[in-house]
Image: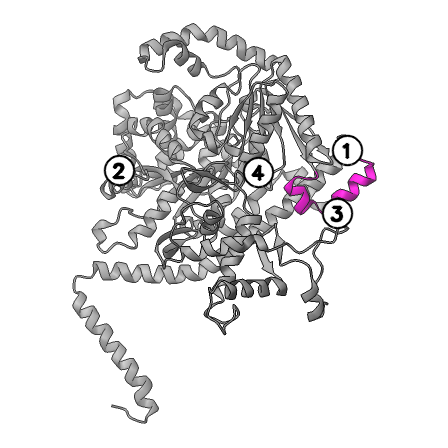
Amino acid sequence: MFDKVLTFVFGSANDRAVKALEPVVAKIEAREPWAQSFKDEEFPEQTKILKDRLAKGETLDDILVDAFALAREAAKRVLGERAYPCQLMGSLVLNSGKITEMKTGEGKTLMCVCAAYLNSLSGKGVHIVTVNEYLAERDSKWMGRVYKFLGQTVGCILSNMSNEARKAAYNCDLTYGTNSEFGFDYLRDNMQIEMAAKVQRGFNFCIVDEIDSILIDEARTPLIISGQAEDDTFKFHEVDKYVGQFKEVEKDPKTNDYPDEVDMTPEQREALEGDYKLDEKSKRVSFTDKGMNKINDILLKQHLIAEGTTVFDSENFEYVHYFTQAVRAHTLYHNDVDYVVQEGQVQIVDEFTGRILEGRRYGDGLHQAIEAKEHLKIAQKSRTLATITYQNFFRMYDKLSGMTGTAETEAVEFSKIYELDVVAIPTHRPVARKDEDDEVYLNEADKWVAIAKEVKEAHAKGQPVLIGTVSVEKSEHLSAILTRNGIPHEVLNAKNHEREAHIIENAGAKGAVTVATNMAGRGTDIKLGGSLESRAKKRAGTDASEEKLEEARKMEYDKWLADCNEVKALGGLYVIGSERHESRRIDNQLRGRSGRQGDPGRSKFYISMDDDLMRLFGGEKMKAIMSRIGMQPGEPINHPMLNRSIEKAQKKVEERNFEIRKHLLDYDDVLNQQRKFIYGQRDEILMDENLSTRVLNNALETVDDIFATYGNAKGNSK
């Protein structure tokens, strides 16, 4: 209560942070006429003047106002876009080493220009991190024109680059790339045998685009460089043959829980029906006594272990691991949900973005177990040569900042792990989207019927609809339902990602219906009325010259504008969520596809008690609420109390995932001390011009230590 009174009187911490930026923004605005007075060719000269001021002892804060004014004017001349005051505020937050939260569609890419330019003047390099290579390459070319106009150099790190090209890119004033490329280059640099072969030059200032995706969602997966280990592929094949003989322990139909073995006698445990138990939340498998005995019997019968030994002997116990991974592969990891099979390979689908994680493999033999399950060629297991978590990698930067549309839900984690504060910047235009209460059904079948009915109504009046699904499988299932209902639509998922640009370009057109996984949830800009550029290319042809395209744009503009206004009058883009994601941020990102830059829009989630989030984390409380309200099959319920319960379930999952990331970091913090020491020693050795003396001194120290230990023990001082 007291906190609320203080907030009412003094404003929230965020309000005060934004208020403190206003005088600085006013100073930058006041310098606009000064920046406008320069000719185009004079901008590089002004950059040199700012660098000279730094060289003479001034700080970045001393030159901030001039640098921001120059960068803003440069962007206006090169791109035709002038940064709004709210974008200047966001850039000031980035420069102070914090996270800028700016709603989708408010121009985050343009926002980072001023902060990046200012920090590049130090000559120590600026790294701008994007979520994929397409964006890294696009932004380095698009925004790179502004930096080059100012006289700065711009590089981009791509996966297919040579060491020489990488080194050249890192030596630029500003370097674009993905989080994984920056991280892997760090690991590779510390495996080099010559200092000259290293490509990076230090960690000065880093701006992370979609920082929540990279520092939160991907933080459970460490970066690993691996080499080949022993070939045990035949064991995965053998074990997979017998996994069908194992049965899950029967659950109590009333509680849906497994029997508690703690108070059971050995005889009762032996009599327990079933061989294993599943923990769907953490995707773990544990065998019962009966299951372990079954493993032992199979191994002996198939002569996979020697006569007279058991699976419990140390030389055979590894088979428990192979059976565990086989059961996990068959029961907890599903095709078209967790992964897809393409071109004879198991390709992991990112649960947060819906995209295929190129080159990624599950660890601890799970990937091989899935390959065996899908009857594919099993790749040889690998061993780790170098590894680091994203948490420890990004904490190496002298100054780290980032931007996203959805960070407030993870503000505590950003503060605890990275010591980063989140500042939410007010929107340039008020959000006009209407976010409706969730509609909840008892079962999944009723939910799909309701979604199809809602889509049919919206499509009939011409309102564009985007339906978000949680997996490839669900997107294809909904597509089949819409087809049966005679609703024309497009499907965007990991299997047809090559059509992504075309589908997104037309997703905002009148009457368009798009079914998409999380691929459409982040970084996609859906234009109401469809894309003018797409129309122009269709009229002029894909190979048309820029002049022909410009002519086609003019011819299509009036029709496109009329369609855009018509779609706005119909209520804008209607976003339907077919299931709540375990993270509230992912839901907010999906909502954020609608109502961009003040456009009208609408969003609504349809939920069933069969959904994974409800089933695993909703708990008995949700079911009690259902029965208390007297819910019947086929009957929807809208109630704020349900919304709060669903949000609590999501918070539960977020807290659990935070603990997983925290434990991973705790382990890596220990490794990090060793990693820093070893990498430091390697660098000293590589830079040492008199290595033979170092080796001799180390040998003498070792001999002295041996004599000090063993000589004294025998009473011999020599």
Q: Is residue 597 above or below residue 680?
A: above
Query: Of all residues shown, which one is farthest toward the bottom?
Result: 715
Point 26% across, 24% down: residue? 42
- Mark nearest the camera among 2 and 4 is 4
- Identify the secondary structure beneath mark 3: helix
Q: Which residues are magenta?
A: 609-633
- Secondary element under disc 2, as helix, strand or loop, is helix
Q: Which residue is mark 2?
A: 52
- Which residue lies under the disc numbered 3? 620
Q: Secondary structure at mark 4?
A: helix
In this view, the mark in front (3 or 1): 1
What colouring method underlies this structural image?
one colour
Earlier-in-chain disc, 3 versus 1:
3
Nearer mark to the viewer, of 2 and 3? 3
Seen in the picture, residue 50 relative to 196 is either above or below; the reply is above
State the residue position of label 4: 585
Quarter of the image for the N terminus: give it: top right
* In this rendering, the label closer to the viewer, 1 or 4: 1
Q: Residues within 10 Å of mark 3 (few under 14, many from 20)?
A: few
- The one nearer the camera, 570 or 141, is 570
